[in-house]
Structure formats: C-alpha cells, structure tokens
Amino acid sequence: MDEYLCNYSRRQGFISMPELHRHQDCHEIYYLATGERRFFVENDLHLLKSGSFVFVPAGMLHRTTYVNDSIHARYYAKLPASWFDGFGDKLQNSFVVNDGEELEVLFAELLREYEKDDALRNMAFRAIASTILVKALRLQSEKKEMSTVSKAVEYIRRNLANPLQLEDIAHSMNLSPNYFSTLFHTSTGMTVVDYLKLARIHKATGLLESGNYSVSEVASMCGFSDSGYFSVVFRSIMKTTPSVYRKKFRK
C-alpha cells in the first residue's frame, strides 16, 4: 500500500465524517472544487466554498460536515509529514485559503501522477505536493486582518472554561447578539452554540488523553457544570463516552 494517497470524489452534501479524527504521521491537504462544506480543525471552524483549500498538520483533530444537500466535489491527499521537514515551522499550524482556485490545476495533476505506475511516480507526486503547499502558503500569507468571526472564535477558545453566553461573545465584539448570531452563522454555517459544543469537546479530548483528570474534572475545565450533560454532548460528537475515550489512552 502507498505511504501516501490522493483521490477525487463527488458526493451528496449530507455526507459527513462520523467523528473527529487525526492522521498521526501524515499531513492532509483538501481542496473543495464545487459546493459548500463545514471544516473543523483543532479549535477552528471554517465554512468552505468552491475554491477553498485546507491544510491539516499531522496529529490534528479534524472533521468535515455538511452545509446543505447539494452535491460537492473535492480533492483530498494524505502526505507523509517526513517529506516536508525542510518547511521548518511553516507547517505546524492548520490554515485555510478561501480563494485558492489556482490550486485546482495542481490537485488535478497530483491525482494524475498518483494514478500512474512508473519509476518517476513517487518523485513527481512529492514534487507536485510540495508545489501545492508552497503556493498555498504564499496565498495564505496575503490574508487581510482577522475577520470579526475569527476574532470571536479566538475569544471563545480563550474562555472555554467559563459559562459563555451568546450575549457575552457578541458584547466582546461590540455587536448586538442578533447581528452577531447571524454573522457567525453566515460565515461558518454553524450556530454559536453548536460551535461552542464542538470546541469544548475538542478541548476535552486532549485533557482525557492526558489521563491526568477525571471525567468530572474535565467537564468542569471545559465549561460544563453538569458532567452528565458533558457525557451526552461528548458522545454525540465523538461517538463514544468520555470514560471509554479516556481508557483508550491509559497506560
């Protein structure tokens, strides 16, 4: 089996990854050719439209979900992280390029090389993948100042242990709750409440994996006053209970 892979697919919009997952030793690159998708990676939430590119570093939790029932088409590739050691710290964090249409030609070329069977296949595939990352990094560096929604997401991430309300977040952005709620949903395809749940559960997975805290302690540290409700939310997102998840990482 190849140590790397690449594929292209057209799918119905309602298809979602069943749970948050990670590739321990491989980076993931994703290009949405048509349609819309939500993409959650670590604590960041993005509403992708056609032409969007996502880079997910090895080891980062991520998941894609639906926005609507329309068909979407996407390119996907999994790449050994060891190939890109020469990039230094440039690939430590995930990033998104929202206007990356020029990358589609490179993804199509990457797929063609993947489907070949000759002595130059591996070398060519690796070279094209590197070119995609270089171009994506350059496009990403041209991003403007953080949007209001990006700032709100950062605020939420810093305050996950607190009993956050929509009004608190909107006030921190100097916006009315109704306007902020609409802006957030338009930008991400997700409600503020749903994003809060997702971000808190992501934080919980890291704490549970450490094995240093009980389930009730983790619930409190992630902003859940009721450990029973925490378990319900955790199971709805991770498809397992906090206790079972914690045991997987106990030595």
Image (spheres, helix red, strand yellow):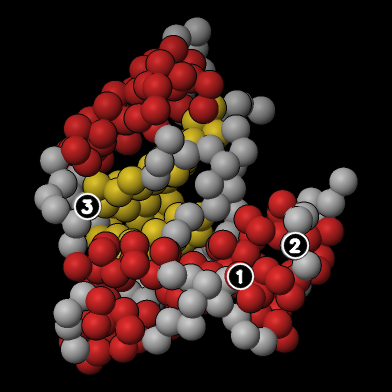
Extreme top residue here? 119
Q: Please determine whether, in this image, residue 11 is positioned above or below residue 230.
A: above
Q: Position of residue 111 (x, y in %)?
A: 40, 33
Q: Earlier in the sequence, mark 1 or mark 3?
A: 3
Identify the residue at image location x=39%, y=44%: 94
Residue indicated by mark 1? 221
Query: CA separation, marks 1 and 3?
Result: 33 Å
Q: Earlier in the sequence, mark 1 or mark 2?
A: 2
Question: Nearer the observer, disc 3 or disc 2?
Answer: 2
Residue sitting nearer the eye, 240 or 160: 160
Give the structural element (helix, strand or loop) at label 2: loop
Q: Residue 173 appears in which quarter of the rendering?
A: bottom left
The residue sitting at 75% across, 62% down in the picture is 213
Q: Is residue 70 above or below residue 132?
A: below
Badge 1 amino acid:
Met
Q: CA distance from mark 3 to mark 2?
A: 38 Å
User: How many residues crowd mark 2 within 10 Å: few (<14), some (14–19), many (20+)?
Assistant: some
List the residue tagged with mark 2: 213
Q: Is residue 232 above or below residue 208?
A: below
Say if residue 97 shows up in the picture: yes
Residue 98 bears which disc, if any?
A: 3
Amino acid at pointer 3: Asn
Q: Nearer the viewer, residue 57 or 1?
A: 57
Task: Give the quarter of the image for residue 169.
Answer: bottom left
- Whether tag 1 and tag 2 are in contact, CB under 8 A, the answer is yes
Query: In the image, what residue occupies the spot 25% across and 89% down?
Result: 177
Left or right, 34 with reference to 202: left
